[in-house]
Amino acid sequence: MRPEVREALIAKLTALADDEVILAHRNSEWTGHGPILEEDIALANIVQDELGHATLWYGLRQALDGSDPDRLAFFRDAYEYRNCELVELPKGDWAFTMLRQFLFDLYETLWLEAAQHSTYQPLAEAVQKIMREERFHLQHTYAWVERLGLGTEESNRRLQQALDMQWGYAQQLFVPIPGEELLVAEGIVPDLAPIKARWLELATRHLQNSGLKLPINPGYQPTSRAGHTEHLWSILAEMQSTARWDAEAKVW
Amino acid sequence: MPVKYGVPSDPDYTERLAEFEARIKRGEKIEPGDWMPEEYRRQLIRMISQHAHSEVVGMLPEGAWITRAPTLKRKMILVAKVQDEAGHGQYLYHAAETLGVSREAMLDALLSGKAKYSSIFNYPTLTWADIGTIGWLVDGAAIKNQTMLAACSYGPYSRAMVRICAEETFHHKQGKEMVLLYAKGTPKQRQMAQDAINRWWWPALMMMGPHDKDSPNTEVLVRWGIKTKTNDQVRQEFINEHAPEILEAGLTLPDPDLRYDEQTGNWLHGPINWDEFWQVVGGNGPMNKERLEARRRAHAEGAWVREALEAYAAKQQKTAVAV
């Protein structure tokens, strides 16, 4: 692999993993506080899967540059994280969390389907492992969007509010990272443009069928993964507090 | 199926009670729908629902550390553990439902403060080492109790316990592994582990409940095979297993009177502070108000979600009928 391709791949894997870590963090804030016991269980499953995906992506990076996944997750600062801003937004109410999860799961499922044929074998293998879980997540959140959208006036209003807030942020999922075009040219990762078109089509259809309106003005659309919301510092301060508490500790 | 719950004023009560007690004596399981004394049913509902509530409230002190777990693997293990607790709550609510009480009624009793849950969850989790210590001591104490309950006379409770014990055993191992790791870790890790043991040891001993002489329910519970051992017996088993292991790890226990008794082979403990126990049971533990408030808040904030689900289901049904 040419050094510039390798470097771009490392950056892409980091972005993929960081999205999962931060989203899992937000979702895990629901543990013990869900609206129904059964949903606590279901969301905890999703969290475990996301952490598993993060571990796989960091693991692929480790194979390339030897970096330790836990060092990456627990010892990088906010300006070094490469997650999208959507996943940082506070968990909000159940509508906010379910909508974000739906928008993200739909993106991830489509991305994984396209990435199955990656010319980079370790990535193609990781995709196979993740894809089955991700389809289950999508089924789950797809159903929630429909239930809340078509449930009561209040649930529809809350979901619409979440959509108005998140729609612009969600577009960042389709902004390539610097150097991604090299990876696309080598067939290592799929081109985001057709995935975005398909995502827009499917998301729009499902949201509209669920009684929602796409915002006329999508609002802020982040473009760089070097940028973050005001929340990331606090997320990391909390997430890394134990790992960084004892500088001498080698194992946890 | 008309469920029969006998009361002493029934004409055939004495006869049926004798038959019921004979079944228990033969080691048969009592199943939903079988004749049973109303008092047996009442005691079981009390115990099983308390147990279910304990699982659900027990998610809070540990769940709070998911976002602060120090490695990805520990985080995953902790999410899985807290998820198991939710699952245990679910089986236990189902087991109680077989006695003709609804989950809603049980939840109402919890949220109104009428129903109890294990007092251990009214203590705060102050450091990450508490997560290991809860797994080792609190789950360890719970397993002793639950292993006994797996042999209990009520079929659905007994079967739920078998399943739960298997998972708890896993949590217990994970907790022990963590504390042992930190006990031989850096000075700060060791200190954190010791501090956690100091705080959780006595509350763990209190988990088995008051001494036998002060436990009003024990006699009838033992006779009907709901409990097969007394509180003090279970407590002794717990200490005999855990005290030597903790000492062997180079940690100390906060009981100056603790000693091994050659004659009985038991580890004898000093006096338990029952005043503290009754304070916590009575609602004045460090976290009683916060725990209940967290449950109430989750329930209240979830109300619109549950309403939406019902409304959606009703609309679907209507559409199905119209088609």
Image (spheres, coloured by chain):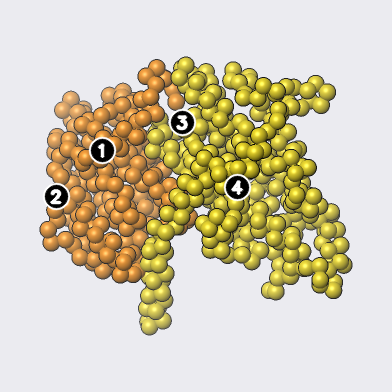
User: In the picture, which chain is yellow?
Assistant: B
Amino acid marked by disc 3: Thr
Q: Are marks 1 and 3 on the same chain?
A: no
Q: Where is residue B219 in the image (x, y as percent from the top left)?
A: 79, 50
**Structural distance between the alpha carbons of marks 3 and 4:** 26 Å
Query: Which residue: 53% across, 58% down?
Result: B112
Residue linked to disc 4: B282
Q: Are marks 2 and 1 on the same chain?
A: yes
Location of the N terminus of chain B (image quadrant): bottom right
Amino acid marked by disc 2: Tyr
**Structural distance between the alpha carbons of marks 2 and 3:** 39 Å
Residue linked to disc 3: B127
Q: Where is residue B297 in the image (x, y as percent from the top left)?
A: 42, 54
**Structural distance between the alpha carbons of marks 1 and 3:** 23 Å
Do residues under tags 4 and 1 come within 8 Å of each other at their CB atoms?
Answer: no
Residue B306: quadrant of the picture: bottom left
Q: Which of marks 2 and 1 is nearer the N terminus?
A: 2
Report the side of B59 relative to A236 (left or right). Answer: right
Report the side of B265 relative to A200 (left or right). Answer: right
Residue linked to disc 1: A232
Chain ID of residue with mark 2: A
Q: Tag 4's secondary structure? A: helix
Q: Tag 1's secondary structure? A: helix
Amino acid marked by disc 4: Gly
The answer to whether residue A95 is above or below residue A2 is below
Residue linked to disc 2: A220
Instruction: Chain A: give its colour.
Output: orange
> A234 or B149, which lies in front?
A234
